[in-house]
Amino acid sequence: MKQIIIIGGGAAGFFCASNLDETKYKIIILEQNSDVLQKVKISGGGRCNVSHACFDPRELVQFYPRGNKELLSVFTKFQPGDTMEWFDKRNVSLKIENDNRIFPESNSSQTIINTFLTEIQKKNVEVKTKCVVKEIIKENEKYIVKTSTGEFEADYIIYATGSSPKSLKIVENLGHKIIDLVPSLFTFNIKNDLIKDIPGTSFEYAEVSIPKLKTEESGPLLITHWGLSGPAVLKISAWEAINLARLKYNFEIEVNFVSKTIDEAEKLFQNFRQSNPKKTIGQSKIFEVTNRFWQKVLEISKVDLNKQVSNISGKEMQMILENLCKKKLQVTGKSTFKDEFVTAGGVDLKEINFKNMSSKILSNFYIAGEVLNIDAVTGGFNFQACWSEAWLIAQDLNLK
C-alpha cells in the first residue's frame, strides 16, 4: 500500500485526508504544534467562518487579491455550494448569515473540528503532533521526510504547512521559487484627535482611500484603541499588501465617514438648518454617525456644541464637512487582525498545476493552502480556497 504524508494539520491537510481513499493509501498527518486545526478553532471568533455564500466562481475569485486567475478553474470544480453539501452529508448544518458568511448552526468551531476528527478516524489516518519537519529529501521515486521525531518515507507528499518562513525554506530547498512574504489583512495604526478616546465607534458604510496608491475601498469601518479597522480597512490592506509593505506602513489615507460627497453632505446640512434653526448643533442628528463621534467632529472643527444650527458660519460648516467627508489621517504602522494572521507571498503560482494542485517541479508532490501565494479578504474565503484545493488533490490521488 502506498504511503501519503500530509505535512500540516490545518484546514487543507485535514480536508484532503478526509477525502482520500483509505483503501488505496496509508495516510499520515504531521503537525508541528501540539494541537491540530488551530486556525479553524479561532476563526470567526471561535464560531468558524467555514466559507462564503458566493456560488459563481467568476464572482468568487474577485475576493482574492492574489490567486484570482488560478483559482477560477479550481472553483469551477469545487465551490462554496459543494462545501455546504459536503458538511450536510456529514450531518453538519451550516447557515448563511446576513453578510453571506457561512457558519455552523452550532456557532462553534468545535463542530467542524469534530467532523474532521471523525472522518480521519474512520479512515485510520495517523496524526503525529509535535512533529517538526526539518527537511525533505527526494530519493528516486520516494521522499524521505526528516522530522524532530524521526524519519518517514512517502510515495506522495501533500504540503499544506501554512505560510511560516521555515516551511517555505524547505520547499525552496526542493527547487520551488518563493515570493517574499508580507502581511495581508491588517488594521491601521493612527494617532489623531478625531478618533482618540472613542474606540468601538462604528460606521455602517464608509470609504477609505490611499491617494498615493490611487486606490479606494468601502464598507463598514471601526475605530479601535490603536486606529482604524473593519472590512473597508482590511480589504484595502489585502489588495495593497505588497505596496504598503514597500511604504513601510507609513502613508496617508483619506476617510469619508458618511460616504457622501461634500456637496451632498452640505445639502443635508442646509435642509436640516432650514427645518431645525433653533436646535443646538451638538444635539443635531444630521448624519448617520454616533453622538460621541459627532461631538468629536464638532470639537476638532472648533464649533461650540451649544451654538444654534442657524448660527453656524459657512467656514464652520466647511470644517465639519471636511472632517466628515475628506478627513486625512496619517497611518504609522499596522496591527495583525485578530489571530487570523494572513500573508501574501509563498510558493510561486506559476510552478503549480491548478488542475490537481501538483507541483510542476517535483513529481508526486502536491501543495495547498496558505503556503501558496494565494490570499483573500476576510469572510471565509481563505478557508474555501483550502477546501477546494485539498478536494482536487484527493480526487487526483484517488484516481491513481
Image (cartoon, helix red, strand yellow):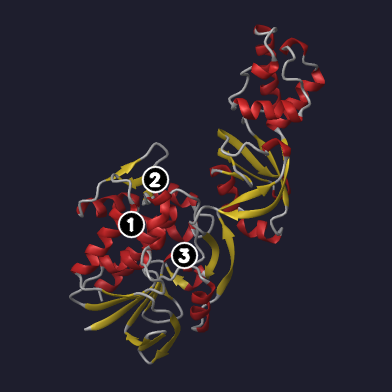
| Residue 180 appears in the picture as rendered | yes
* Residue bearing mark 1: 78
Mark 3 or mark 1: which is in front? 3
Q: Mark 1 is on which residue type?
A: Phe
* Residue bearing mark 3: 370
Q: Nearer the viewer, residue 280 or 184?
A: 280
Q: Position of residue 105 (x, y in %)?
A: 29, 44
Q: Quadrant of the C terminus?
A: bottom left
Q: Name the element at disc 2.
A: loop
Residue at the (66%, 49%) spot, across then down: 189
Name the residue at the front extreme. 197
The earlier-in-sequence mark between 1 and 2 is: 2
Disc 3/disc 1 C-alpha distance (Å): 18 Å
* Residue bearing mark 2: 54
**What is the count of numbered marks?**
3
Q: Which of 396 and 277 is in front in this view?
A: 277
Q: Residues within 10 Å of mark 3 (few under 14, many from 20)?
A: many
Q: Is the residue 6 above or below the residue 271 in the image?
A: below
Q: Name the element at disc 3.
A: helix
